[in-house]
Image: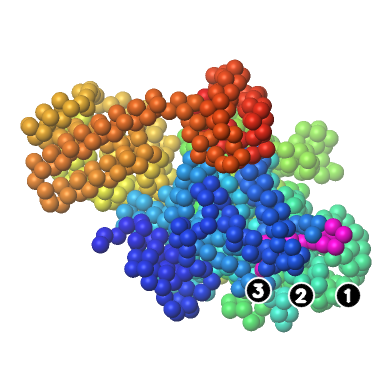
């Protein structure tokens, strides 16, 4: 028996969750092996029609069991089911996220119905969150669902008849197939074609048996995340394969975990484009937030440090923790205080809480207000800055259910303010969250927040390497530039003896300190030096940043340098391409204040404009503002000309490592010489932090080897031959899937290095080889629709440019047009010339791709693949290969003729007739033909070319359809209306 998607991955998932081995139809008796919650039912055993999303019989049983009022009157269950069905149907009007959000209110038990005495509203429970065994947990496979078209997800999990998890399995034995192909199917195909199925969805997952990734509805694929196992260090980094995926699956899909995510870790928020989105946690956010909650519930240890690397989602972790703490009944309505240490961070955290619609959130604008709230024993989530604890009174609130979450827990928290906070809230729990802990005598994050009971001083840790491995953040590259403009070490040492740069400097303080070192300042801001740097920035940006659609930040020594850089940049770019973001002080001249001062409102607008990919704003110029707490995923490159050290440096450079489509790394271009000694600049106790930055010189060293590896796939191929002969020779060298995938892997690694280095002059000597490899790669890359999204990726901007700019060497020979008909096939059959057979093979592949969605052609395509495999393994002679190929070609012609006839036959009226006959029941009038004729006549009058793409066209057609259905008293059947409208949209 061979390995395939079904027997080796899909059936493994079912075995892992339910104990049922579908390969041999056996059930494991040992429930400890699979948890004992999920029960397998085949699709045939589910009591449903192909159009139904819910298992209504199971749902009704659960409603009667979990709601006393419905127990007394079971008919009330139908009213609830009717309401839920209405949300499913609404998905086409309101969109999937809003429908899911509405359904979640029911799932979480937040909805009421007038089922009590005297029509009193009582909460309706769909799920028992306390006693898991009171719910039914069903897993099924090959779940056929028809809406506008039929789709068959591999795995669907139901809780009380509600489909809460959709999973897609892919084959584990073909290197080019990855979990990404399954995720693409769920996200891009199923969510659109059968969106009703996803209205109750908690999460979806995809795996090819090597890696497991999961995501919420409408989550772009780059934000799907792996699920890791807590306290399993070895498994996290080193082990892959079915065993590891099985453990992760069992952990993620354990009912307790799923219901926790449903109840406490699902947020509906609004993104910067004002779109509603759903957010579920990455595993480090889930683990960190739950550790906070558990520690508070236990009540023994009163503090803890969470060290998660920059960019790995600490703001959301705080939202999840605060939300769950407020919901914990045992904590008796706690007060959760979220403290940030900078005013500009205040807006980011507040924004995260407000956008997520968390209830009972209050932001304080003054110390007095904060003190009043605490003295009055306010039970809410309070967001404030630590500076507002200045002059706080002793024992302001002595309750032990006050929980303080401190963001970026270093710097000021270790000083007097930290002590005042502890004195004001003596019994509070204190949790510090940081991406950059400090372990020095005067400022020690571990002492302030780390509990002795915690190994290493932190209760949860997520390193830079973890975040890169999980695609939570991107790698950082740095480029040292222009040695003659760097500051020499002696000057630095002298000038900065007194320049003890505190991390929380304001713009004004930075200016003042710079004035103390006039010599340094004069050197840094000398017009000649700034001209030289800006000229280099302009060239670098145009060559390396702009072609990819990314943006940049320029970090200058002080506020006046910001203006200098802006004026110089305007010589190379339009004025609107750059903006200065600085604050001004009372001592500044009026003209300077009026021209350059940026208040909070203006800053927010600038940030919003910068985040808009279509806007003209390409550069933000700063000195201290926006170096921390600034989230702009489109920012890829930072031009750094300022001395920054330690955690401030790490926070600043990590502005560039946020995920963004087609972005593969963040880049720091260093003009100051900050990274001349990277280890010193990033002075942390952890050795691992020193590898945060990868120098481009390392990539230069790797390029020749990577090029050699990619070319080794084409041993003996003459790369000087042009035209189709040369291309065919290259394709023949990688003539099966394994060889193609091996080449794709080598090329992918090479292309990453090439894109990172481009336009480095050292690439010139390798350009011919790289261009040749790129063209071969493009010629064998599968159609984007079907296979291997991860390995067979799109070419990068630099590579595409290289291929476009260079005209083909030599003339391009077109293969002669090859007609597929019975005579041609007969001729090849009788004269099996390998060249003609090859042409026939290519033509068949082209035809199969054209009809990719048709099962008949899919079957023919699979037979061709099997035939080619046999030939490659030498299991059949070349004569037999040609004969079988001709047989396949004949069947293809027959299939195409049948398809043509079907298309001719399937007129719009025929399609509608088919629909009405399919949905016909006792109440449908017998005169189906007349109904269809009426609809056809009315729709033909109001429709116009392209009506489907205009709201007025859709409105008119919908109105006409309702009118036609009203005549036959069918206007109340919403499903019939939706299906009929779907057909009209497709066929008219």
Which of the marked residues, 1 or 3, is nearer the chain's N terminus? Answer: 3
Q: Position of residue 645 (x, y in %)?
A: 61, 58
Quote the CA–CA distance across marks 1 and 2: 24 Å
Which of the marked residues, 1 or 2, is nearer the chain's N terminus? Answer: 2
Q: How many numbered discs?
A: 3
Q: Position of residue 875 (x, y in %)?
A: 12, 51
Foreground mark, 3 or 2, reads 3
- What's drawn in magenta, residue-wise? 116-129
In magenta stretch: residue 235: no
| Mark 1 residue element | loop
Q: Is residue 869 above or below residue 226?
A: above
| Residue 264: mark | none
Q: Main secondary structure of the magenta part?
A: loop
Residue at position x 53%, y 27% in the image = 929
Q: Position of residue 612 (x, y in %)?
A: 63, 36
Residue identified by numbered label 2: 330
Crowding around mark 2 (Cα neighbors within 10 Å: few <14, some 14 to 19, many 20+) is: few
């Amino acid at each position: 028996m061979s390995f395939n998607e079904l027997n080796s991955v899909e059936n493994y998932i079912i075995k892992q969750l339910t104990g049922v081995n579908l390969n041999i139809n056996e059930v494991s008796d040992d429930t400890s092996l699979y948890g004992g919650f999920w029960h397998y039912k085949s699709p045939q055993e589910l009591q449903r029609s192909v159009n139904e999303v819910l298992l209504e019989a199971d749902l009704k049983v659960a409603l009667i069991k979990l709601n006393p009022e419905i127990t007394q009157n079971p008919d009330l269950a139908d009213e609830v089911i009717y309401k839920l069905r209405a949300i499913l149907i609404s998905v086409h009007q309101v969109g999937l996220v809003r429908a899911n959000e509405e359904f979640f209110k029911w799932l979480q038990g937040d909805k009421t119905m007038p089922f009590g005495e005297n029509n009193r509203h009582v909460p309706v429970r769909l799920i028992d969150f306390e006693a898991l065994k009171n719910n039914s947990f069903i897993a099924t496979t090959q779940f056929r669902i028809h809406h506008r078209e039929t789709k068959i997800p591999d795995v669907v999990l139901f809780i009380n008849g509600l489909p809460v998890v959709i999973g897609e399995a892919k084959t584990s034995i073909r290197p080019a197939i990855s979990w990404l192909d399954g995720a693409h199917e769920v996200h891009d195909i199923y969510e659109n074609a059968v969106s009703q199925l996803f209205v109750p969805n908690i999460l979806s997952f995809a795996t090819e048996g090597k890696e497991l990734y999961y995501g919420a509805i409408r989550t772009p694929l780059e934000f799907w995340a792996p699920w890791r196992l807590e306290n399993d260090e070895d498994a996290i980094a080193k082990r892959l394969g079915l065993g590891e995926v099985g453990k992760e699956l069992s952990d993620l899909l354990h009912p307790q975990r799923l219901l926790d995510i449903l109840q406490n870790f699902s947020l509906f928020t609004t993104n910067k484009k004002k779109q509603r989105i759903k957010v579920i946690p990455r595993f480090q956010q889930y683990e960190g937030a739950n550790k906070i909650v558990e520690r508070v519930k236990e009540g023994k240890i009163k503090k803890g440090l969470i060290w998660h690397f920059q960019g790995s989602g600490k703001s959301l972790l705080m939202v999840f923790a605060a939300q769950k703490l407020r919901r914990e009944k045992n904590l008796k309505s706690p007060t959760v205080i979220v403290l940030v240490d900078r005013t500009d961070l205040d807006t980011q955290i507040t924004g995260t809480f407000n956008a997520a619609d968390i209830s009972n959130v209050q932001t304080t604008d003054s110390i007095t207000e904060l003190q009043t709230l605490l003295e009055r024993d306010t039970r809410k989530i309070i967001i404030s800055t630590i500076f507002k604890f200045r002059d706080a009174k002793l024992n302001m609130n002595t309750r032990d259910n006050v929980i303080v979450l401190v963001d970026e827990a270093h710097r000021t928290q270790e000083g007097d303010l930290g002590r005042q906070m502890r004195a004001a809230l003596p019994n509070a729990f204190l949790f510090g969250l940081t991406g950059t802990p400090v372990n020095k005598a005067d400022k020690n994050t571990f002492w302030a927040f780390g509990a002795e009971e915690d190994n290493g001083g932190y209760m949860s840790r997520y390193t830079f390497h973890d975040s890169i491995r999980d695609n939570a953040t991107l790698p950082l590259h740095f480029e040292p530039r222009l040695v003659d403009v760097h500051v020499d070490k002696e000057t630095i040492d002298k000038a900065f003896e007194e320049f003890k740069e505190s991390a929380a400097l304001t713009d004004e303080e930075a200016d003042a300190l710079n004035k103390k070192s006039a010599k340094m300042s004069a050197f840094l801001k000398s017009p000649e030096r700034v001209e030289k740097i800006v000229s280099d920035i302009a060239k670098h940006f145009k060559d390396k940043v702009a072609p990819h659609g990314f943006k940049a930040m320029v970090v200058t020594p002080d506020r006046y340098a910001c203006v200098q850089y802006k004026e110089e940049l305007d010589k190379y770019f339009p004025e609107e391409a750059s903006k200065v973001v600085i604050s001004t002080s009372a001592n500044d001249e009026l003209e300077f204040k009026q021209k350059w001062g940026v208040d909070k409102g203006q800053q927010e607008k600038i940030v919003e404009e910068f985040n808009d990919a279509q806007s003209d704003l390409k550069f933000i110029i700063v000195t201290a503002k926006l170096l921390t707490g600034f989230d702009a995923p489109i920012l890829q490159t930072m031009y750094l000309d300022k001395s920054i050290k330690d955690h401030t440096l790490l926070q600043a450079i990590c502005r560039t490592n946020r995920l963004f489509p087609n972005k593969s790394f963040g880049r720091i271009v260093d003009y100051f010489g900050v990274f001349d000694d990277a280890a010193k600049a990033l002075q942390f106790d952890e050795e691992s932090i020193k590898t945060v930055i990868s120098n481009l010189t390392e990539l230069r060293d790797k390029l020749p080897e990577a090029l050699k590896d990619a070319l080794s796939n084409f041993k003996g191929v003459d790369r000087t031959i042009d035209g189709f002969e040369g291309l065919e020779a290259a394709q023949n060298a990688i003539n099966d899937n394994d060889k193609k995938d091996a080449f794709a892997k080598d090329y992918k690694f090479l292309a990453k290095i090439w894109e990172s280095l481009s336009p480095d002059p050292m690439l010139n000597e390798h350009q011919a080889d790289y261009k040749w490899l790129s063209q071969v790669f493009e010629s064998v890359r599968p159609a984007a629709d079907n296979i291997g999204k991860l390995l067979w990726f799109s070419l990068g901007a630099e590579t595409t440019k290289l291929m476009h700019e260079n005209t083909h060497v030599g003339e391009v020979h077109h293969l002669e047009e090859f007609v597929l008909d019975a005579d041609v096939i007969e001729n090849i059959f009788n004269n099996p010339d390998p060249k003609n057979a090859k042409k026939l093979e290519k033509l068949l592949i082209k035809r199969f791709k054209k009809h990719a969605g048709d099962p008949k052609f899919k079957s023919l395509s699979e037979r061709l693949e099997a035939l080619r495999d046999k030939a490659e393994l030498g299991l059949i002679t070349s004569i037999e290969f040609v004969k079988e190929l001709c047989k396949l070609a004949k069947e293809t012609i027959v299939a195409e003729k049948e398809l043509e006839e079907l298309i001719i036959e399937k007129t719009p009226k025929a399609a509608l007739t088919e629909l009405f006959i399919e949905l016909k029941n006792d109440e449908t009038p017998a005169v189906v033909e007349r109904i269809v004729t009426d609809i056809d006549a009315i729709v033909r009058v109001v429709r116009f070319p392209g009506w489907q793409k205009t709201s007025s066209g859709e409105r008119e057609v919908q109105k006409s359809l309702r009118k036609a259905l009203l005549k036959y008293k069918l206007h109340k059947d919403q499903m019939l209306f939706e299906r009929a409208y779907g057909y009209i949209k497709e066929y008219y």
